[in-house]
Image (spheres, rainbow, N blue to C red):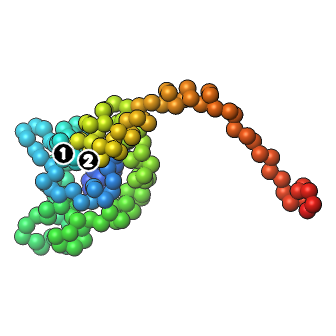
Amino acid sequence: MHDEDLAIEDRFAGLLVLLYAQHITVVSRLPTTAVTVEGSQTFLLLGTTPLLLPDPLDKLARRLLARRRGHTTIGATSDSTWLFPGAYAGEHLSSHHLGVRLKRLGIYSRPGRTSALMGLSTQLPAAVLSKLLGISPEGATAWTQSGGNWARYAAGLQDRPPPRLHHTTDASETPGA
C-alpha cells in the first residue's frame, strides 16, 4: 500500500482484491465513474451502495483517477473512461494482464479473495456484503454462514471419527508382488 516504487495501478488493484474480495475481471473493468470524490471523502462503487474508502486507500484512488491514461493514450485529447486503461485506446486493462502484474507482487487472486471474504463475512451481514461488494445475495449468504461460524465448525470436528491413517507400502511389500 505504501511502496511508492510500485505502480499505483498495481497497488490499488491489489488492495481491491485483498481488502474487498474483488475479482480481477471486475477490477480491470472499473470505469472512472466508480470513484466519486465528495469533499474530503472518496467513495468506490463496487455494488449498489458506494463504499467509503479509508485513508490511505482514498488517496490512492484519487491519484489513480487523476492519471488515467493508458499506454497508447499519451497523444489522446481526452482521458480514458477506465480506471485501469489498457494498451489500446479506449479499452480497459485486460484481466489477464492485471493478474500477471499482481502475481509479480505476490498477490494471487483466488486465495486473496477467499481470505478477504472470510474476514468480511464475520463482520458484515450478507445483505451489506452484497450491496457493498457487488457479490450475489446467495454468495454473500453462503460466505456469512461459513465465515461467521468457525466456532461451530471446530466444535463439530470433535464429533467426527478420527481420520484413518493408511500405511503405504512399496511394491516389494505388497503380497503377491
Q: Is residue 119 visible?
A: no
Q: Describe residue 121's horizontal placement relative to residue 38 as left or right.
A: right
> Of the residues under marks 2 and 1, which one precedes in the sequence?
1
Is 3 situated left or right of 106 in this image? Answer: left
Q: Nearer the viewer, residue 11 or 143?
A: 143
Q: Secondary structure at mark 1?
A: loop
Residue 130, x across and y down, in percent: 27, 42
133 is higher (above) or lower (below) than 176: above
Instruction: Using residue 166 as the reference point, say whether residue 126 is left or right of it.
Output: left
Answer yes or no: is residue 121 visible.
yes
Query: Which residue corresponds to mark 1?
Result: 48
Query: Which sits in the foreground, 34 or 102?
Result: 34
Residue 168 location in percent, x, y?
Answer: 80, 50
Task: Give the residue type at disc 1.
Answer: Thr
The quadrant of the image that shows the N terminus is top left
Which residue does the image show at 59% across and 30% down from the upper left?
Answer: 157
Quadrant of res 43: top left
Q: Residue at x 23, y 41 (%)?
A: 131
Query: Which quadrant would residue 163 be assigned to in this image?
Result: top right
Quadrant (top left, top right, bottom left, bottom right) of the C terminus: bottom right
User: What's the distance in space between the residues labelled 2 and 1, CA to CA?
Assistant: 7 Å
Q: Are marks 2 and 1 in contact (CB under 8 Å)?
A: yes
Q: Which residue is mark 2?
A: 134
